[in-house]
Image (cartoon, rainbow, N blue to C red):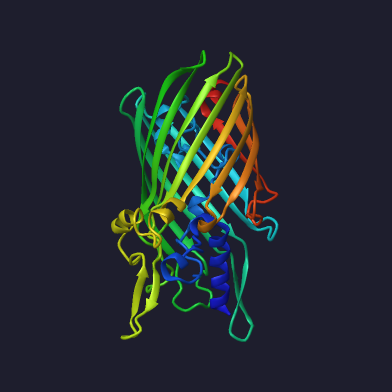
C-alpha cells in the first residue's frame, strides 16, 4: 500500500506536467510494430511550472519579455535592465483544483540593484501536494504527511553593454514525498543546480512606430540528479529556452508587445529496448543509452531520439503571446502553447489582465485547454500574482 501511495503521488505531479512526457506512436517505422509511450521523465517537475500570471496569460512565454521581478524564473539576466532599484513579487497558483483543494504552488522573489550595471535577485518556490494518509499492507493507518517540494535560488546579473547582459543563478532543490512514513528506504531528495542566461535589447522602428525588440536565452536547472533512495536517481528538468519579443508604441498611451519562446528539455530520450533472441540479453533496438552523466545527457539530448531528426523536432514546444497596455496602467493579454501530440500533446489558450497602481501591480491569468488536451491541472483556475516596487512605496 505504501509503495502504491508513493507511486500515485509521483504520477499525479509528473503526469500533470505533460511537457515532461513523450509519446511515440510511430515506432512501427523502425521496428515494424506499435510501441508504448516513450516518456522523457524527470524528478521535481514543479520547477517547470510558470509561476506568474503575466507570462501565464501569454502562453507561458517569458524569456524575452520586458524585465520585472519574475525574471528570476524566466531569465534572470533581464534584472540587469530593470528600472527600479528594488522590488518584490508574490504569486499563488492552485493546482489540480478540479480534483483536490489542497495542492498549490507559491512563489516569492526579490531583487536589488547594486549599481547601474549589476543586479542581484533571490527566489523561493514552494509546492504543496496536500495531505496523504499512509497505511500498511493490511490497510491500517500508520500516519499522515503532506508531501512538499521547494527550491531556493539566488542570481547575479550584469550588463556587459547598453544592450546586452548575462546572468547566472544558483539553486538548491528539496523534495520530500513520504516524510519517512513507513516506506523503507525512502528519503528526501536534494540537488543543486545553476541557470545560465542572457538578454539583448535594442531600439527599433517599424511602419513609422518606435519601439524595441529583445532576444533572450536561458539554460535552466543544470545540476545533479535527484532521487528518493540510494538505488535510483533521475535527471532534474534541465531545459533550454530561447525567444524573442517586440514592442511598438502606437502613441503616448497605447503599446503592444508580441513574444515567442521555444523550449527543449536537455534530457536523454529513453531508447527502445529489446531482447536478443540468441543470448537473451537486453539490447537497444533504437536510440541511445539514457543512463549517462549530466554533461553527456545534455549533449546527447540533441541527437538520441529513436526516430532520429523527426522525433528531435517533436521535442520542441512553442509558446506565443501578445500584450496590450493602455497608459502603462491597464493590460490585456492572450497566448497559445503548443506541444507535439507525441510528446505530451499539451495545447491550450491563455488569457489575462494586468493592473499597475502607484505601489504595486496585480495580474490575473486563465487557461483554456484546446484540442484533445482537456485535463490540464490549471483548467478552470484563476491565477494571480503581485509585483511591489519599493521605489514607489518609498515615494508614497
> In which quadrant is the N terminus drawn?
bottom right
Q: Please provide percent x and percent y for residue 351.
A: 65, 38
Name which residue lies at 33% across and 82% down: 281
Q: Nearer the viewer, residue 136 or 298?
A: 298
Q: Nearer the viewer, residue 232 or 306?
A: 306
Question: Along the horizontal axis of the image, is 218 left or right of 293?
Answer: right
Q: How many marks?
A: 0
Q: Nearer the viewer, residue 295 or 141?
A: 295
Q: Please provide percent x and percent y for residue 341.
A: 55, 55
Name which residue lies at 50% across and 60% down: 21
Q: In this rendering, is residue 188 above or below 19? A: below
Name which residue lies at 52% across and 39% down: 61
Q: In this rendering, is residue 161 above or below 289? A: above
> In which quadrant is the C terminus drawn?
top right
Question: Where on the picture, by quarter, is residue 111?
Answer: top left
Question: Where on the picture, by quarter, is residue 4?
Answer: bottom right
Q: Please provide percent x and percent y for residue 388.
A: 56, 32
Q: Please provide percent x and percent y for residue 161.
A: 32, 24
Question: Along the horizontal axis of the image, is 271 left or right of 319?
Answer: left
Amino acid at each position: 500500500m505504501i509503495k502504491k501511495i508513493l507511486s500515485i503521488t509521483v504520477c499525479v505531479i509528473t503526469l500533470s506536467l505533460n511537457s515532461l512526457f513523450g509519446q511515440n506512436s510511430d515506432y512501427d517505422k523502425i521496428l515494424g510494430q506499435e510501441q508504448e509511450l516513450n516518456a522523457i521523465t524527470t524528478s521535481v517537475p514543479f520547477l517547470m511550472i510558470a509561476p506568474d500570471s503575466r507570462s501565464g496569460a501569454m502562453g507561458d512565454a517569458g524569456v524575452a519579455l520586458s524585465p520585472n521581478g519574475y525574471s528570476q524564473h524566466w531569465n534572470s539576466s533581464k534584472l540587469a535592465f530593470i528600472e527600479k532599484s528594488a522590488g518584490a513579487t508574490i504569486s499563488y497558483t492552485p493546482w489540480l483544483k478540479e480534483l483536490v483543494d489542497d495542492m498549490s504552488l507559491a512563489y516569492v522573489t526579490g531583487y536589488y540593484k547594486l549599481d547601474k550595471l549589476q543586479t542581484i535577485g533571490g527566489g523561493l518556490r514552494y509546492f504543496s501536494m496536500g495531505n496523504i494518509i499512509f497505511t500498511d499492507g493490511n490497510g491500517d493507518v500508520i500516519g499522515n504527511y503532506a508531501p512538499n517540494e521547494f527550491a531556493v535560488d539566488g542570481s547575479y546579473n550584469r550588463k556587459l553593454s547598453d544592450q546586452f547582459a548575462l546572468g547566472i543563478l544558483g539553486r538548491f532543490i528539496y523534495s520530500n514525498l513520504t516524510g519517512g512514513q513507513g516506506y523503507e528506504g525512502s528519503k528526501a531528495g536534494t540537488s543543486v543546480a545553476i541557470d545560465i542566461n542572457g538578454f539583448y535589447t535594442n531600439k527599433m522602428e517599424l511602419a513609422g512606430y518606435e519601439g524595441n525588440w529583445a532576444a533572450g536565452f536561458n539554460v535552466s536547472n543544470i545540476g545533479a540528479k535527484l532521487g528518493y533512495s540510494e538505488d535510483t536517481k533521475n535527471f532534474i528538468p534541465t531545459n533550454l529556452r530561447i525567444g524573442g519579443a517586440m514592442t511598438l508604441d502606437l502613441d503616448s498611451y497605447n503599446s503592444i508587445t508580441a513574444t515567442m519562446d521555444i523550449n527543449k528539455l536537455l534530457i536523454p530520450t529513453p531508447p527502445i529496448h529489446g531482447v536478443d533472441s540468441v543470448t537473451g540479453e537486453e539490447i537497444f533496438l533504437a536510440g541511445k543509452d539514457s543512463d549517462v552523466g549530466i554533461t553527456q545527457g545534455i549533449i546527447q539530448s540533441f541527437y538520441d531520439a529513436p526516430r532520429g531528426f523527426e522525433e528531435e523536432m517533436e521535442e520542441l514546444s512553442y509558446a506565443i503571446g501578445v500584450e496590450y497596455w493602455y497608459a502603462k496602467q491597464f493590460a490585456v493579454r492572450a497566448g497559445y502553447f503548443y506541444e507535439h501530440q507525441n510528446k505530451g500533446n499539451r495545447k491550450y489558450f491563455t488569457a489575462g489582465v494586468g493592473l499597475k497602481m502607484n505601489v504595486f501591480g496585480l495580474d490575473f491569468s486563465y487557461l483554456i485547454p484546446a484540442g484533445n488536451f482537456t485535463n490540464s491541472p490549471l483548467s478552470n483556475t484563476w491565477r494571480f500574482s503581485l509585483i511591489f516596487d519599493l521605489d514607489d512605496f518609498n515615494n508614497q
